[in-house]
């Protein structure tokens, strides 16, 4: 069963409304017996529909007197190709169209759908905003200055994921995108036909139609590309994993690049990282078993976070996972957004640089809901008794560093303070309270080592990282603490 384009039923209803009871053209729909030879006139109509709320429709095969004449197959192809080219080349910003040939009163007519543009006003190329048009009373006319101003106010900035990454032919779409794995991750039944599969990709906004041709969006590339390097400007998008022999980058032991889109390739990246991690031997159910010294959930969440929040305008650096003897460094191109502070990474609802992509990754089950992924990653670090995660916001990259197990004595003063602050934050978001006892448990200290825990707690208070939960209380025994922002 073919998948119906969602706009077709709306177009049919507009057509019926325009023909009955008295034939008349609508703001949303324009009849055409055939294709006009005047390119500028067609561009004006496309501009008007792109500026119209909900977009608009051409109907080819209906004369101006409402008589249904129909269009032939080749004529329909020529119409769609020419309007697609005009929409892309004759307007600013360029527009995309869709089309559908339908039976009507014993004839074949062709609908051409011009979507409402997110960026307004859409105007004729080279004419500036004064070349913007709108539909009014079923006719196309120039926008007034007031209408242009209102269109600018209602416009929104197009996000990176929504931009076209590469125009392509119909058969190229399915070659360039790993649709098989994508459908599996979405938990959908594989479409029965190529047309239904293409429509699924269009509905997911991974692919755009433009007349007879297609284009793959940046979202489509990031989620499901078979090979990111096949797309201009994405040559350095693949994830790189490097394992070094020692504590420095002097000698690499293993290096692998993952060219797949981040959605369809994520599990392969995680499996490979886990296979390269150092392990420790435990006894479970009377059997010896090697387990990674770093928690899997922490690796998953921090790698997902790196991919979701990468700055896609930085094209000279790959996302990197570097594995050393004493640490793992997970790097994504781009610094934190100005609205996000390192100390508020825990229990935050971070503003994502790539929100559309982040939302899609959540649908694929790859990352957690907003803000909870980092919390879960750090909870697991505490359960494993590892040193606190170190976050570094550099000039062109953001980095999360996981450190190999070290006891309290081996930790630096800075690490102890970071452990205290992160523990306090995690207790607070769990509706619990940090105490000397809870902090000792986090660090693996005995009760007799309370003075060592107090020394770190007092230092954290002095530095403004945490604060007493009850400032009026003088009791050490019942003292509890909150993050400075609580």
Image: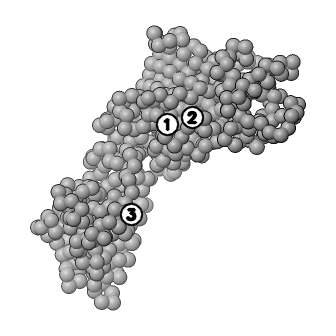
Q: Is residue 81 left or right of residue 293?
A: left
User: Which quadrant holds residue 425?
Assistant: top right
Give the residue at x 72% y 16%: 407
Q: Which colour scheme is used?
A: one colour
Can you say which quadrant of the picture contains the N terminus? bottom left
- Mark closer to the chain start, 1 or 3: 3
Whether pointer 2 and pointer 1 mark residues with C-beta atoms closer than 8 Å, the reply is: yes
Disc 2 crowd, CA 10 A, few/some/many (<14, 14-19, 20+): few
**On residue 154, which mark appears?**
3
User: Could you say where residue 197 lies in the image, as x and y percent from the top left?
Assistant: 40, 52
- What is the secondary structure assignment of the residue under circle 3? helix
The CA span between labels 3 and 2 is 34 Å
Determine whether 434 is above or below 54 in the image: above
Can you say which quadrant of the picture contains the C terminus? top right
- Nearest the viewer among 166 and 372 is 372
Q: In this view, does 448 lie to the left or right of 77?
A: right
Q: Is residue 236 left or right of residue 77?
A: right
Give the residue at x 50% y 34%: 306
Determine whether 152 is above or below 460 in the image: below
Residue highlighted by disc 1: 336
Using the rendered image of the protein, determine whether residue 461 is visible from the camera's viewpoint: yes
User: Which quadrant holds residue 485?
Assistant: top right
- Nearest the viewer among 334 and 454 is 454
User: Could you say where residue 13 lies in the image, as x and y percent from the top left?
Assistant: 38, 77
User: Could you say where residue 231 lies in the image, as x and y percent from the top left?
Assistant: 31, 37
Give the residue at x 56% y 28%: 391
Residue highlighted by disc 2: 342
Q: Is residue 410 left or right of residue 373?
A: right
- Nearest the viewer among 146 and 175 is 146
The CA span between labels 1 and 3 is 28 Å
């Amino acid at each position: 069963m073919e998948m119906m384009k969602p706009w077709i039923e709306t177009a049919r209803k507009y057509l019926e409304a325009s023909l009955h009871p008295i034939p008349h053209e609508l703001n949303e729909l324009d009849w055409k017996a055939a294709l006009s030879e005047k390119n500028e006139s067609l561009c004006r109509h496309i501009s008007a529909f792109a500026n119209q709320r909900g977009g608009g429709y051409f109907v080819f095969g209906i004369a101006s007197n409402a008589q249904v004449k129909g269009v032939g197959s080749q004529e329909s192809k020529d119409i769609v190709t020419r309007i697609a080219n005009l929409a892309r080349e004759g307007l600013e910003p360029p527009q995309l169209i869709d089309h559908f040939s339908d039976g009507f009163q014993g004839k074949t007519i062709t609908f051409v759908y011009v979507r409402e543009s997110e960026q307004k006003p859409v105007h004729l190329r080279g004419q500036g905003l004064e070349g913007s048009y709108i539909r009014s009373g079923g006719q196309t006319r120039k926008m007034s200055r007031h209408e242009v101003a209102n269109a600018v106010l209602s416009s929104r900035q197009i996000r990176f994921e929504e931009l076209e990454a590469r125009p392509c032919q119909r058969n190229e779409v399915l070659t360039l995108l790993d649709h098989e794995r994508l459908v599996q991750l979405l938990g959908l039944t594989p479409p029965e036909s190529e047309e239904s599969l293409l429509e699924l990709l269009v509905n997911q906004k991974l692919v755009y139609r433009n007349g007879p041709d297609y284009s793959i969006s940046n979202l489509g590339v990031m989620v499901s590309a078979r090979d990111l390097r096949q797309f201009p400007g994405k040559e350095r998008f693949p994830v790189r994993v490097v394992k070094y022999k020692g504590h420095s980058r002097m000698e690499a032991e293993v290096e692998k690049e993952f060219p797949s889109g981040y959605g369809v390739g994520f599990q392969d990246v995680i499996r490979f990282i886990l296979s390269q991690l150092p392990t420790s031997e435990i006894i479970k159910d009377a059997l010896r078993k090697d387990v990674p010294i770093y928690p899997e959930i922490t690796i998953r969440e921090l790698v997902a976070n790196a991919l979701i929040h990468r700055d896609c305008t930085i094209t000279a650096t790959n996302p990197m996972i570097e594995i050393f003897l004493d640490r793992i460094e997970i790097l994504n191109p781009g610094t934190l957004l100005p609205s996000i502070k390192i100390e508020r990474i825990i229990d935050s609802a971070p503003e994502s640089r790539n929100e559309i992509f982040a939302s899609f990754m959540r649908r694929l089950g790859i990352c957690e809901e907003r803000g909870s992924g980092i919390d879960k990653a750090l909870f697991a670090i505490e359960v494993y008794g590892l040193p606190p995660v170190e976050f570094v916001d550099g000039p062109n990259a953001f980095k999360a560093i996981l450190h190999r197990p070290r006891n309290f004595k081996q930790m630096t003063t800075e690490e102890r303070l970071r452990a205290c602050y992160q523990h306090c934050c995690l207790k607070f978001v769990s509706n619990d309270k940090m105490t000397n006892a809870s902090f000792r448990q986090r660090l693996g200290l005995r009760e007799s080592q309370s003075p060592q825990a107090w020394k770190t707690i007092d230092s954290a208070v002095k530095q403004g990282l945490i604060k007493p939960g009850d400032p009026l209380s003088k009791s050490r025994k019942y003292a509890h603490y909150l993050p400075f922002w609580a």
